[in-house]
Structures are given as C-alpha cells and as structure tokens.
Image (cartoon, helix red, strand yellow):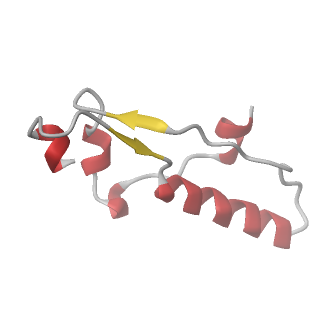
C-alpha cells in the first residue's frame, strides 16, 4: 500500500486472505453443525489502486467478516 500511496506502483491484485479465512471458518462450522453449505464459493479478485486502497489499511482486528449469504447470491 505504501508504494501505491506514494505513486511508485500503479496497482496490485488482491484475493483478500482475510475474507477467505472468514468464509472458510463459516463453512467449516456450518458443516460440522450439519447445516447446508454451498458447494462452491467464488471470490472475485480486486485491483487495488490509489482510488480504493483505504479499506486495506484498517487493522485486521477492526475488520468485519462478510456474511456467506452476501457472497453466494
């Protein structure tokens, strides 16, 4: 992010490991509880540049996990 903010790097790609971890835990817990889980969850990569890097600077402990339902519809 520092290089993007400084204009030394145009952009980068992100598959958001934080979101992946959140969703993996949600699916695992639901599976262990015998609840239905989606067969597949697809996450779109994001191109991060100087117009949208700000959320990535939020400390992990302050981020909220997305709901699985919001990503599978």
Which residue, as the protein is rendered here, is positioned at the far left?
6
Q: Where residue 52 sits: x, y (%)? A: 30, 31
Q: Is residue 24 left or right of residue 9?
A: right
Q: Quadrant of the C terminus?
A: top right
Residue sitting at x 28%, y 33%: 49
Residue sitting at x 83%, y 73%: 32
Which residue, as the protein is rendered here, is positioned at the far top?
51
Q: Is residue 59 above or below residue 29?
A: above
Q: Where residue 8 sits: x, y (%)? A: 12, 39
Q: Quadrant of residue 37?
A: bottom right
Q: Is residue 35 above or below residue 8?
A: below
- For the image, the number of numbered tags is 0
In front of the other: 14 or 26: 14
Q: Is residue 31 left or right of residue 42?
A: right
Residue sitting at x 31%, y 42%: 55
Q: Where residue 69 sits: x, y (%)? A: 71, 41
Q: Where residue 11 sits: x, y (%)? A: 29, 36
Q: Is residue 57 left or right of residue 25?
A: left
């Amino acid at each position: 992010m520092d290089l993007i903010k400084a204009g030394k790097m145009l952009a980068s790609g992100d598959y958001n490991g934080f979101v992946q971890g959140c969703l993996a835990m949600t699916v695992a817990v639901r599976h262990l509880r015998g609840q239905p889980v989606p067969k597949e969850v697809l996450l779109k990569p994001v191109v991060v540049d100087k117009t949208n890097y700000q959320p990535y600077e939020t400390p992990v402990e302050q981020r909220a996990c997305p709901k699985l339902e919001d990503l599978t519809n």
